[in-house]
Amino acid sequence: MNWMTLQEFLFNPTGYWGWSIRLFLVLLLTASVVFIWRRLHRRIGLGVTKSQNKWDDILWKALGDPVAWGIWLVGISVAVTIVRGDLAPHWLSTFGHLRDATVVVLIAWFAIRIVQGLENHWLSASERGPDSRIDATTAHAIGKLLRATVLITAGIMLLQSFNINVSAVLAFGGLGGLAVGMAAKDLLANFFGGLTVYLDRPFQVGDWIRSPDRQIEGTVEYIGWRHTRIRTFDKRPLYVPNATFSQIAVENPSRMTHRRIYETIGLRYQDARQVRAIVTAVKDYLAQHEDLDTTQTIIVNFNRFSESSLDFFIYCFTKTTDWVTYHKVKERVLLDILDIIHAHGADVAFPTRTLYLENNKTG
């Protein structure tokens, strides 16, 4: 059977059984090609994942399902061509529009899978360390913008595939946009609030933030277009509308460069002669401490006569910003200062009251 005979056999059926057999063969061939493609995609994918280049890995993974469904689309198109003589013209026209729309959907699906692969790659890179060029928040933002671009483009192409006038739709959208905007002003405010967070980046996923204006404090877990999810320190989720961040001050302690130790220590009044020596010794101790940043301000001064103590204060900064490590350093500093006080024969004061009793002798 030469090519002309095969073409005549496939596309010029004679009778019901003739095109039924041809239709079955086309669908069987399509299923076989899809099966071969999936096996081939899986085998080649094992080698692609071992390469150092992540781009080919992302592209190859994105091809899998869209290509398989594209093969099915080709097979179904051939099948429809076989039976076109038994279909009404309007059905053939409808199938043509559906076929074009399916092609658009498959291309958009492929593009979105690429975007998802890129986003996952950036997220995994950001988790490996702070030196990554793209952090988690930026990765999410870029991913969402790219997906929105793909969906909008695909939507316009879908309208065109059904011969719908895009200009008329946009004009109608402009007239109805005012009513929709008034009804969804809070939603739009949250959207632009989220966009501002993505652009200004006052915080990112994983940061500890708090606001002096609202009872908001915790670790950022998710930044969306409508709201931001914060995990409070008692492990409760807090959902904050993004519009809120344009109205309040936000403090980001995660971006501090140092942590401060600021403590007031009181000595007994009977240790007044040792105050000068103790202050000098503590200042020398802090200036040589390995966990304190000596390039920052270090202050040790006697500053107050309290009711039951002679007070001096220490003011310095640790090199670490880690909460747990900071408290370990602070504990060691305070205990060492206590040892210095004891070494000078002095002690820490505690609240005292002196009571004078007058002895009134009566005859």
Image: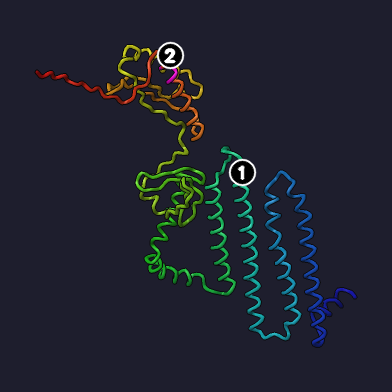
Which residue is depicted at the point 44% across and 27% down? Answer: 317
Percent of width and height locating residue 37: 77, 62
Question: Is 72 in front, or is 6?
Answer: 72
The part of the chain drawn in magenta is: 337-341
Q: Quadrant of residue 11?
A: bottom right
Report the residue that reaches farthest toward the bottom: 15
Question: Is 299 in front, or is 302?
Answer: 302
224 magenta-colored: no
Asked if 179 appears above or below 14 in the picture, the reply is: above
* Residue 286 in view, yes or no: no
Q: Quadrant of the C terminus?
A: top left
- The residue that label 2 is drawn on is 343
Q: Which mark is residue 125?
A: 1
Q: Quadrant of the N terminus?
A: bottom right
Q: Residues within 10 Å of mark 1 (few under 14, many from 20)?
A: some
Percent of width and height locating residue 85: 73, 85
Tag in front: 1 or 2: 2
Report the residue that reaches farthest toward the right: 1
**Majority secondary structure of magenta residues:** helix
Q: Amino acid at mark 1?
A: Ala
